[in-house]
Amino acid sequence: MQTQAADGVLCIGLLEDDADFREELVLGLGGYGFRVSFACGNSADFYRQIETQPCDVVILDANVQGGEDGFSVATRLRALHPVGIVMLTGRAALEDRVRGLEGGADIYMTKPVDLLELSSVIRSLARRMRLSRGPAPTPGADRSASQAWSLQDGGWILVSPEGASLHLSAQERLFLNALMEASGNVVSRQALSELFNPTNPSDFELRRIDVLVSRLRAKAQSSGMKLPVLSVRGQGYVFAA
C-alpha cells in the first residue's frame, strides 16, 4: 500500500481520545508538513476511517476508551495493513513498552512529546519503510523462483516455499530484506543498526535487534513457519535458506 500523496506529503491517521491533545496534534503535525487524513477519539471510528482513508503512518494512544485500546488496535493493524505504527501514550512502564512493540508498533513514545521530535520520528519511520521495500518481481522468472522464500506486496509479506504468508512490521521487513539480499552471507549487527537508524546508528541499541529476531521467530512459528534466520555468534544474522 502506497498512500503517500503525489506531492510527497506523508498521510497520518490519529487515534487519541483527549480532544484537546488530538486537536493539538492535528494542528502541530500539519505545521510540520504532514497531512492528517483523519483524527478519531475511539477505535470504532478509527477502523471505519482507515478503510476509506488509507495512510502511511498511524499514531495511537494506548488508553483510548469506549472500545479496543491502542495495544489491540496496533496488533490488529499489523495483521491487516502495511502501515507504520507509532504508539504515543502516557504509559511509560517497561512492560507497556514491550507490549506495544511486541504487539506490532514500530515506535513507542511517551507523553509529553515534543512535536519536532515526533515529526522526526515519523519521517525516519517512513524512510525505513521505503528502504525496506523489496524489489518488484522480475517478469518471466523461472519456476524455481516461486519455490523459494520471498518478500511480496512491496516487501510487507514474507512467503515461504510452501506458500504460507506472514505480515511484517516495518522493522521486520527491513531486517528480512537485508538478510535475503545478502544471499546467504552474514549481515552484521552494526550494518543492521545503520539500516534501522541511518541518521545516528551509534544511538541504536544492538540488543533491540535480538529482541526483534526473537519476536519474529515466535510470530512465524505461530503461523506455521520455521524461519531460516540463524544467529552467528559475535557477527550477526544470516538467512540460511
Image (cartoon, helix red, strand yellow):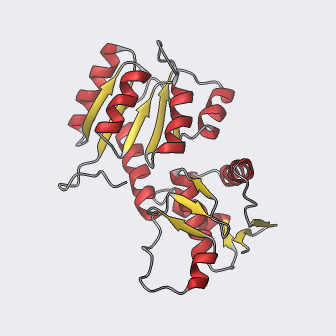
In this rendering, position of residue 96 left or right of residue 225: left
Q: Quadrant of residue 6?
A: bottom left
State which quarter of the image contains the N terminus: bottom left
Q: Nearer the viewer, residue 9 or 90?
A: 9
Q: Quadrant of residue 2?
A: bottom left
Q: Nearer the viewer, residue 117 or 17?
A: 17
Give the residue displayed 29% in from the left and 37% down from the top: 52
Numbered marks: total: 0
Q: Where is residue 88 in the image (x, y as percent from the top left)?
A: 47, 29
In this rendering, position of residue 233 left or right of residue 6: right
Residue 166 visible in this rendered orientation of the protein: yes
Q: Position of residue 173 (x, y in %)?
A: 54, 59
Give the residue displayed 48% in from the left and 60% down from the top: 198
Q: Which of 187 and 202 is in front in this view?
A: 187
Q: Quadrant of residue 98?
A: top right
Q: Nearer the viewer, residue 77 or 34?
A: 77
Residue 202 visible in this rendered orientation of the protein: no
State which quarter of the image contains the C terminus: bottom right
Q: In this view, does 188 lie above or below 47?
A: below
In this rendering, position of residue 5 left or right of residue 168: left
Q: Which residue lies furthest to the left in this view?
A: 7
Give the residue displayed 59% in from the left and 33% down from the top: 100
Q: Position of residue 154 (x, y in %)?
A: 44, 63
Q: Position of residue 28 (x, y in %)?
A: 26, 30
